Amino acid sequence: MNIILLGPPGAGKGTQAARLVAKHGMRQLSTGDMLRAAVKAQTPVGLEAKAVMDRGELVSDAIVSALIDEELASMGADTGAIFDGYPRTGAQAEALDALLAKHSRKLDHVIELEVNEDALVERITGRFTCANCGEGYHDTFKQPKAEGVCDKCGSTEFKRRPDDNEETVRTRMTEYRAKTAPILPIYDARGIVTRIDGMADIDEVSESIERVLAS
Ligand code: AP5
Ligand code: MG
Ligand code: ZN
């Protein structure tokens, strides 16, 4: 099974992808996570991407499609792929079709998380993750069970993304509206898009996604 999770910044793509990985053993292909790893490792891609990401703009199509190609090449044929934050432009959507064909895969579902943009700023500016295992948390919606201690691994170190400030979030949303939302009709024409209410509880969103995968 190969699926795309589509939605603006803070829609819950990463949250839901992590659950699908845990439940179905699929692989999460998040170009945002790959780029952040490249920035941290100071690779040539990371050095080029850092300033663009800090502004909330899109990194070049060639860079992100090459990252996806590498990931797909490293995956077993029977491991499902969850595309999280990719494709984000018409050119990336075309590149993905070519990459899926190259790696003998077929796109099963595009799941659009529909959200209210005003709520997203609060979601994003409250977000933090475990510095050790990457588990996601939120100041208001998902605090660790014991204050300051990761539920999953017990670490007491947490981090926040440098692009999770209000100004950058607004730019990320503008980019989504201008460049990413317009690719939906490509998938609508193929009849593979399901729209889900991304404002529902995290568990309810997961249940809706499970129903799509079972359909
Ligand atoms: P990327 O990392 O993809 O960021 P994004 O698309 O802006 O999305 P986010 O990761 O912020 O949100 P999410 O939907 O994953 O939400 P989450 O589950 O964390 O990209 C970052 C940058 O990299 C881009 O700006 C660009 O520069 C570059 N880039 C990446 N891919 C690229 C590409 N393909 N092309 C070009 N450039 C690219 O949830 C958010 C918060 O809300 C969490 O705290 C969570 O706990 C909470 N939450 C989640 N669901 C719910 C719910 N249902 N109810 C209440 N709270 C919830
Ligand atoms: Mg994410
Ligand atoms: Zn942890």
Image (spheres, rainbow, N blue to C red):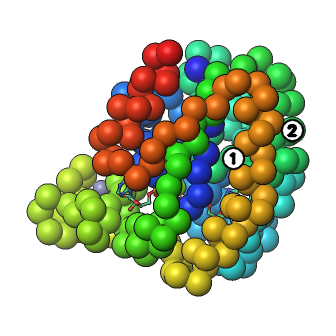
Q: Nearer the viewer, residue 124 or 157?
A: 124
Q: Are marks 1 and 2 in contact (CB under 8 Å)?
A: no
The residue lying furthest to the left in this view is 146
Q: Quadrant of ligand 3?
A: bottom left
Q: Secondary structure at mark 1?
A: loop
From where the camera sits, is residue 122 visible?
Answer: yes
Report crowding for label 2: few under 14, some 14 to 19, many 20 or more residues within 10 A (C-alpha): some
Q: What separation in Å lies between label 1 and label 2 (alpha carbons)?
A: 11 Å
Give, as a three-letter code, the residue at label 1.
Answer: Tyr
Question: Could you tell me residue 201's position as x and y percent?
Answer: 31, 48
Report crowding for label 1: few under 14, some 14 to 19, many 20 or more residues within 10 A (C-alpha): many
- Which quadrant holds residue 32? bottom right
Ligand 1 within 8 Å of disc 1? The answer is yes
Tag of residue 86? 1
From where the camera sits, is residue 160 visible?
Answer: no
Q: Nearer the viewer, residue 50 or 210?
A: 210
The answer to whether residue 169 is above or below residue 202 is below
The residue that disc 2 covers is 94
Q: Is residue 65 left or right of residue 118?
A: right
Q: Residue at x 73, y 42 (%)?
A: 184
The answer to whether residue 45 is above or below residue 24 is below
- The mark tally for this picture is 2
The answer to whether residue 158 is above or below residue 25 is below
Question: Could you tell me residue 179's position as x and y percent?
Answer: 78, 58
Q: Residue at x 45, y 31 (%)?
A: 209
Question: Could you tell me residue 192's position as x and y percent?
Answer: 67, 26
Q: Residue at x 59, y 58 (%)?
A: 8
Indicate which disc, 1 or 2, sits on the residue closer to the N terminus: 1
Q: Is residue 209 left or right of residue 135?
A: right
